[in-house]
Image: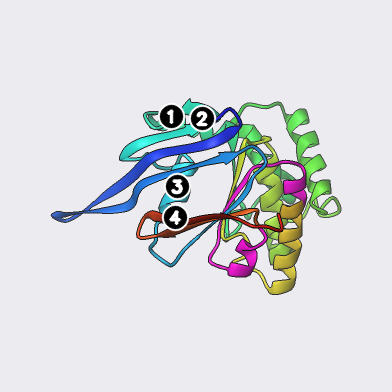
């Protein structure tokens, strides 16, 4: 792993048992992501995108190979250690937002800090700051059902940023949005890139992927192509 790499996968394989057969969802995957890179992971359905995102997000462990996150090999971590790593160093943005319907915008944003034992006043101040940053400073007391899809995704982005993560992981972040709301969300991502946030995004949308600085294409659990966009 190079000094500037935040993420490094070395010969990562993820194998599932299906009856008497085994299936490699990922097969000897190798790549590194540097600080501040904006990477889109693309490929057809069943190519391994979701499995790769689960490994990168410390939600699942490789069957073989090594995964270094922030220079630390997390491949052999137990579930508790992986959970702690997720909470402190990763931010997740979901296609379906995954907001808690009973909580307000402010409470949803600060929720990850609650699980880390951060004090109430510090958590509230951080959540307010991020709500303002994503343009929802005027909707702090609203519940998710009172927001548009685009606004809910803004809450999701603020929540993902609240722990100042090493890496933002986004799973089809515009998949449930109309084109106008999707464009607004992608503008937020562009702003995060300018702030040198490290972003890894899974998308099936070629137009969305083209906005990233780098595209990694998977097919049958292997990297088929790894290209950098010339305009980025």
Q: Which residues are magenta?
A: 191-211
Residue of label 2: 84
Foreground: 29 or 59?
29
Q: Residue furthest right?
A: 138
Q: Earlier in the sequence, mark 2 or mark 3?
A: 3
**Does 207 lie within the magenta span?**
yes
Residue at 46%, 63% (x, y): give it: 43
Residue 15 at x, y percent in the picture: 28, 48
Labels 1 and 2 touching (C-beta < 8 A): yes
Task: Label 4: state its secondary structure.
Answer: helix
Q: Residue furthest left?
A: 20
Which mark is in front, 2 or 3?
3
Q: Is residue 157 left or right of residue 95?
A: right
Q: What is the CA distance from the residue labelled 2 to the residue labelled 3?
A: 15 Å
Residue of label 1: 80
The answer to whether 27 is drawn above or below residue 67 in the figure is below
Which mark is in front, 3 or 1?
3
Q: Is residue 37 left or right of residue 20?
A: right
Q: Earlier in the sequence, mark 3 or mark 1?
A: 3
């Amino acid at each position: 792993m190079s000094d500037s790499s935040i993420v490094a996968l070395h010969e990562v394989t993820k194998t599932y048992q299906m009856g008497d057969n085994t299936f490699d969802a990922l097969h000897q995957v190798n790549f590194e992501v540097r600080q501040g890179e904006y990477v889109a992971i693309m490929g057809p359905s069943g190519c391994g995108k979701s499995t790769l995102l689960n490994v990168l997000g410390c939600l699942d462990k490789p069957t073989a190979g090594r995964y270094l996150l922030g220079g630390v090999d997390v491949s052999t971590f137990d579930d508790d250690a992986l959970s702690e790593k997720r909470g402190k160093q990763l931010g997740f943005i979901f296609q379906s937002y995954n907001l808690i319907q009973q909580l307000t915008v402010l409470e949803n944003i600060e929720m990850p800090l609650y699980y880390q034992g951060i004090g109430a006043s510090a958590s509230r101040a951080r959540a307010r700051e991020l709500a303002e940053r994503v343009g929802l400073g005027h909707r702090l007391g609203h519940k998710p059902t009172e927001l548009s899809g685009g606004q809910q995704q803004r809450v999701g982005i603020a929540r993902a940023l609240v722990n100042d993560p090493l890496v933002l992981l986004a799973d089809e972040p515009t998949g449930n949005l109309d084109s106008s709301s999707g464009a607004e969300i992608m503008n937020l991502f562009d702003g995060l890139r300018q702030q040198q946030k490290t972003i890894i995004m899974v998308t099936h949308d070629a137009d969305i992927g083209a906005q990233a600085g780098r595209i990694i294409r998977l097919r049958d659990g292997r990297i088929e192509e790894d290209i950098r966009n010339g305009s980025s």
